[in-house]
Image: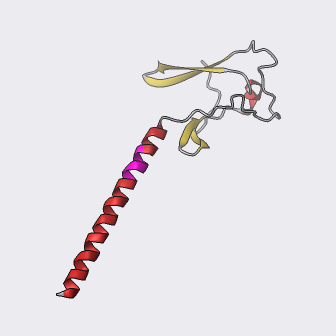
Amino acid sequence: MQHIGKSKVTKLNAKAGVVYPLIRLPKTYANEIGNVAEIFETQQDNRRALLVTFNDGAAPSEVIQPDSKVIQLLPKVIQPDGLNSVESSLSELESEINRLKSLLLENKASASSKKQK
């Protein structure tokens, strides 16, 4: 195995609430842009290692040229699993708001009865 370079793992915010780890390859691998990469996890010297392989036999129609634009092929947007937690959070917020409203009304009623005394 040959060491080819060093890259800091950064983050890519594809859309709100979705973060992907991003590793950049050296510029010499620009010809791999558009090819399918398969990623495997293994152990090397008692450390976690990732092995990246490329499908060199990709058909020309599958390869994206570096200067081309990305086109969304599927019209349906896949929602992340966090959507259910967002809905439950909103429901919880609504119930807390209702509870606060009732406390404010009780407090107002209590204050007005103290004024009358």
What residue is drawn where x is 22% and y is 76%? 110
Between 90 and 30, the one lying in front of the other is: 90
User: Which colour assignment does the render follow?
Assistant: secondary structure
* x then y, percent, for residue 60: 82, 17
Q: Quadrant of the N terminus?
A: top right
- Specify whether residue 13 is in view: no
Q: Main secondary structure of the magenta part?
A: helix
Instruction: Verify whether residue 89 appears in magenta.
Output: yes
Between 72 and 95, the one lying in front of the other is: 95
What residue is drawn where x is 25% and y is 75%? 109
* x then y, percent, for residue 19: 55, 40
Question: Vertically, is 1 above or below 14?
Answer: above
* x then y, percent, for residue 72: 72, 32
Q: Quadrant of the C terminus?
A: bottom left
What residue is drawn where x is 69% and y is 28%? 74
Question: Vertically, is 5 above or below 41?
Answer: below
74 displayed left or right of 113: right
Question: Vertically, is 25 above or below 99?
Answer: above
Tell me the quarter of the picture where residue 65 sits: top right
Number of marks in the rendered image: 0
73 displayed left or right of 44: right
Q: Residue furthest top?
A: 57
Magenta-drawn segment: 88-93
- Specify whether residue 110 is in view: yes
Q: Residue furthest left?
A: 117
22 displayed left or right of 108: right
Instruction: Verify whether residue 92 appears in magenta.
Output: yes
What residue is drawn where x is 75% and y is 12%? 57
Between 77 and 55, the one lying in front of the other is: 77
Tell me the quarter of the picture where residue 40 sits: top right
